[in-house]
Image (tube, rainbow, N blue to C red):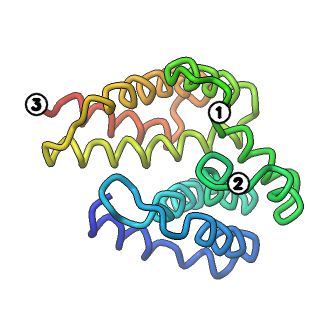
């Protein structure tokens, strides 16, 4: 996400003020991710905010949008599912857990394959959170590639995003988030 994209994403967050659950989730995520940065140096929380915006724009409920804001807190902070359940309810906590990697799997490719399988069994809302996350991350990767900053480890990410698209195509054919992911990945593949 470059500076302009970040501003556009933040400008689309007015819905947060109308949603107490999502507002609380954003406050919690901001605190949990405080000091963390994305690859390009912007605050980490801009990614979960973009995921929430994508879910809101796709018409998902407040629980799903809140889970989008929180989707990285189990993986990237010391928060746990029990804490999320206590604070945001079991539906939100279960969604976040469903889209979180299993840290006991050391091999990244196996861990990502296990995550895709886990998500595919977790229901439509979890699949939507996963899809919005991949749209955001694939867009971020496309911007890095456009700027000539493709790194060796980005190949594994690209493979995971492509495998995710294939899974999502089966689970949510024709869904706007799946279509957006396809556009982002097609753009990455079209770059030199």
Residue at 50% across, 27% down: 164
Residues tagged 3 and 2 counted as in contact (Cβ below 8 A): no
Q: Mark 2 points at which residue?
A: 64
61 left or right of 91 in image: left
Q: Give how far across and how far down residue 120 sits, in percent.
A: 68, 26
Q: Which label is found at residue 103?
A: 1
- Nearer the observer: mark 2 or 1; the answer is 1
Q: How crowded is mark 3: few (under 14 residues within 10 Å), some or many (20 or more)?
A: few
Q: Give how far across and how far down residue 60 sits, in percent.
A: 66, 55
82 left or right of 143 in image: right
For the N terminus, which image quadrant? bottom left
Residue at 39% across, 23% down: 159
Q: State the residue in front, 25 or 54.
A: 25
Q: Name which of mark 3 and mark 2 comes first in the sequence.
A: 2
- Nearer the observer: mark 1 or 3; the answer is 1
Q: Name which of mark 1 and mark 3 comes first in the sequence.
A: 1
Q: Residues within 10 Å of mark 1 (few under 14, many from 20)?
A: few
- Check disc 3 and report its element: helix, strand or loop: loop
């Amino acid at each position: 996400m470059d500076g302009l994209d970040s501003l556009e994403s933040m400008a689309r967050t007015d819905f947060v003020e109308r949603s107490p659950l999502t507002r609380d989730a954003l406050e919690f995520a901001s605190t949990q991710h405080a000091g963390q940065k994305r690859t390009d140096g912007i605050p980490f929380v801009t990614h979960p905010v973009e995921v929430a915006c994508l879910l809101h724009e796709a018409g998902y409920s407040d629980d799903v949008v809140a889970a989008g804001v929180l989707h990285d807190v189990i993986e990237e902070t010391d928060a746990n599912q029990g804490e999320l359940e206590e604070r945001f309810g079991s539906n939100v906590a279960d969604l976040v857990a469903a889209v979180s990697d299993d840290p006991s799997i050391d091999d990244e490719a196996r861990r990502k394959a296990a995550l895709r399988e886990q998500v595919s069994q977790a229901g439509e809302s979890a699949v939507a959170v996963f899809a919005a996350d991949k749209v955001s991350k694939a867009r971020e990767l496309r911007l890095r590639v456009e700027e000539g900053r493709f790194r060796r480890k980005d190949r594994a990410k690209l493979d995971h995003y492509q495998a995710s698209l294939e899974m999502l195509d089966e689970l949510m054919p024709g869904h706007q988030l799946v279509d957006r992911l396809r556009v982002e990945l097609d753009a990455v593949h079209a770059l030199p």
